[in-house]
């Protein structure tokens, strides 16, 4: 198998799960990076003679975060269930249970790969701001994320076949 080089996170989308169904994916512009660590559950079996017989690791999800330049008001409404008034003011409401969503994105490189994680829970990002000086630093937002399987036992899918219909329609619908 040839080595591949990855660079260039792009096309970050999310598809909120509302009443058990995925909405049409929505773009989340300004993606900077995504960092996910596998969550493994190790299982060891010891025989009656006290000798370890088998050991296995089972993947049950991922934990990590993604970084964006800003969150959209749609993301805050659909995921965090913030309310919005007729003038566009978002109001955070205490006690809301957040909506889960699928997370879709593309990584460029020697092989372009598109991924979809089916069942993501998003944490709230920290709120931070700083003054400007002679140089301007763009502030970013880090969103914590936990990924588990969906109701059908699927965790994620990926596609690198840029000529396939699935690849071409990746961000149109979660399947």
Image (cartoon, helix red, strand yellow):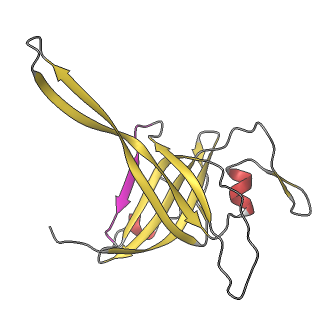
Residue appearing at x 91%, y 60% in the figure = 86
Residue appearing at x 75%, y 61% in the figure = 73
Q: Is residue 63 magenta?
A: no
Q: Position of residue 158 (x, y in %)?
A: 36, 59
- Give the prevailing secondary structure in the magenta stretch: loop
Q: Position of residue 65 (x, y in %)?
A: 52, 55
Horizontal side of residue 49 vs 40, given as left or right? left
| Quarter of the figure that contains the N terminus | bottom left
Using the image as rendered, state which of residue 65 and residue 102 is in the foreground. 65
Rendered image quadrant of residue 168 = bottom left
Using the image as rendered, state which of residue 169 and residue 46 is in the foreground. 46
Residue appearing at x 59%, y 56% in the figure = 143
Is residue 170 visible in this depiction of the protein?
A: no
Q: Return the residue found at the far bottom.
A: 134
Q: Which residues are magenta?
A: 152-161
Q: Position of residue 164 (x, y in %)?
A: 34, 69
Rendered image quadrant of residue 155 = top left
Q: Return the residue found at the far front.
A: 133
Is residue 143 visible in this depiction of the protein?
A: yes
């Amino acid at each position: 198998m040839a080595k591949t080089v990855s660079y260039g996170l792009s096309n970050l989308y999310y598809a909120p799960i509302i009443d058990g169904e995925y909405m049409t994916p929505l773009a989340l512009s300004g993606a900077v990076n995504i960092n996910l660590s596998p969550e493994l559950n190790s299982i060891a079996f010891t025989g009656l003679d006290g000798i370890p017989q088998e050991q296995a690791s089972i993947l049950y999800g991922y934990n990590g975060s993604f970084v964006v330049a800003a969150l959209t008001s749609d993301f805050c409404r659909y995921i965090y269930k913030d309310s919005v008034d007729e003038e566009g003011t978002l109001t955070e409401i205490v006690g809301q249970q957040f909506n889960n969503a699928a997370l879709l994105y593309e990584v460029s490189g020697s092989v372009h790969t598109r991924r979809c994680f089916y069942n993501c829970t998003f944490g709230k990002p920290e709120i931070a701001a700083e003054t400007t000086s002679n140089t301007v630093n763009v502030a970013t937002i880090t969103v914590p994320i936990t990924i588990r399987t969906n109701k059908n036992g699927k965790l994620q899918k990926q596609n690198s076949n840029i000529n396939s219909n699935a690849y071409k329609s990746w961000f149109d619908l979660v399947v």
